[in-house]
Amino acid sequence: MAATVSLRQGDLVWGKLGRYPPWPGKIVNPPKDLKKPRGKKCLFVKFFGTEDHAWIKVEQLKPYHPHKEEMIKANKGKRFQQAVDAVEEYLKKVKAKQEQNSSDDKGKKEGKKEGKKEGKKEGKKEGKKEGKKEGKKEGKSKKPAGEKKRKASDSGPGSAIKKSREQSPRKRGRPPKEEKGTISPQPSSLKKLAMKTVSRFSWPPPTSERTADDPHFRHFLLSQTEKEDSAGDSSWLLHGHRTLGTEMVLKKPSVTYQAISKRLKVSEEDTGSTSIQAADSTAINGNITPTDKKIGFLGLGLMGSGIVSNLLKKGHTVTVWNRTAEKCDLFVQEGAHLGRTPAEVVSTCDITFACVADPKAAKDLVLGPSGVLQGIRPGKCYVDMSTVDPETVAELAQVIVSRGGRFLEAPVAGNQQLSNDGMLIILAAGDQGVYEDCSSCFQAMGKTSFFLGEVGNAARMMLIINMVQGSFMATIAEGMTLAQVTGQSQQTLLDILIQSQLSSIFLDQKCQNILQGNFKPDFYLKYIQKDLRLAIALGDSVNHPTPMAAAANEVYKRAKALDQSDNDMSAVYRAYIH
């Protein structure tokens, strides 16, 4: 749905938010502490029949009256009808008030007419009397012209200036300085002001665009110059893990952060991303100052459990929730607080992380009963760590930001073991301020984090990484089965691969799973197949071929048909031997 006419404050509208049906509302002024979302033009709407309000994109708004019949036919729910009734009640009150004002104005006009008539009569009488008195006075007390001149000269220059101002006619051109502020705006100016009622928010410049005029930045540059002179190195070294350094970039949005011995090294690249990387896993070396913000965590699966454990170990205050509440017990024993619903967790915490299985679970968590959206308030931060498609991320970001919340996507690359060890790789995109606020959390759960820009970029990158990983795993399984059926030793194949340039921990672990027949899940097979499917769809969306991923996807589908969904991804091997 899209707005076909210009909308402004006070207008009644139909607003579309996420997957909900269009709802009647009124465009109002937002609270002073509620910032307008960046990007597309939005208007702040208060909805009838509920206590809800949100920023809605202009293209998701329609004027109320022209589309009333259409909307009422399309929606028959009880709450919807109550909302429409509330609009009609509001319109009745407005009409009654207008009629009252109209009758009051009419009375005032009649009163003014009567007053003018009476005033004229009284004025004439008074004028005649005063005229007679003044005439008598003038006749008696005429003074010589010389005395008048003397009096005028004695009054001083200030008096003369004042008199000349009073007597001289107004010249065309600029008004006198002291009267500038009293001039009424021209009609065109008023129109412009009315059209810009939602554009009155001033936005601070992005942190990546700080200039040398900034005293903090200037101090930073001087300190770095001294280090460069003494070390003979052109790198910038930034001390302390909690300062992320994104504000230190001089009008260069493309930067990458690499670690050097417990410091963060800043270097300029053309990657279009920012990474923050500790020299070694900060969850192991323990050099973390936990944030004083309250942390919430929703979803205690293979990845979420390890993440929460590390957050607690590093001193963070964490409130947990899981669909099956029994999983929360262990973390409560370790010092976590228990949240009864996602809405409760979000409303009581400053930053809430979520890590769930797939796009449907991610949407249900936010939009479902007692979901995240019901707990979001202005300033609350929501960080979705699930691996989902870019479209899902964009929808979630829109509804969170529309309620005044702040959104960051942060899917993680790794497995259960890396999660337990605090060695995950975090890929983030969205609100960079939230990314910086999550610094100590990311250090506790991972060895590296990357900021990739706008919402959706992290989802795309994560799907590409898992597409490569899933295809590689299918190739490993294919090689192991081919060795077996051609009479070659699988162990010898592994020994050779480990000595080759293909050597990796992943290769060794997955081959060991196959050799031992142990497919205890470290990364669920059903989830890697889901990621392959989403990666193929991503390729389709830009008309890019993904034949290797498509072939691998078919093998995983075969493994799922053999009841391997809840085993490790390495169980794809069984698709080749059955």
Image (cartoon, rainbow, N blue to C red):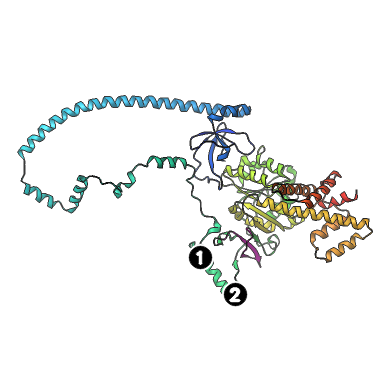
Q: Is residue 261 magenta?
A: yes
Q: Please, what is the three-letter code of the amino acid marked with disc 2?
A: Gly
**Residue at mark 2:** 232
Range shown magenta = 252-273
Relative to residue 27, is residue 557 drawn left or right? Answer: right
- Mark 2: give few (<14), some (14-19) or many (20+) Cα within 10 Å: few
Q: Is residue 302 magenta?
A: no
Disc 1 element: helix
The residue nearer to you, when weighing 352 against 273, is: 273
Return the residue nearer the eye: 108 or 250.
250
Q: Are marks 2 and 1 in contact (CB under 8 Å)?
A: no
- Residue identifier under label 1: 218
Residue placed at 19% from the left, 27% from the top?
A: 122
Q: Is residue 550 above or below residue 486?
A: above
Q: CA distance from mark 2 to mark 1?
A: 20 Å
Residue 34 on image: x %, y %: 53, 45
Please provide percent x and percent y for residue 14.
56, 33
Write down the quadrant of residue 315 in the picture: bottom right
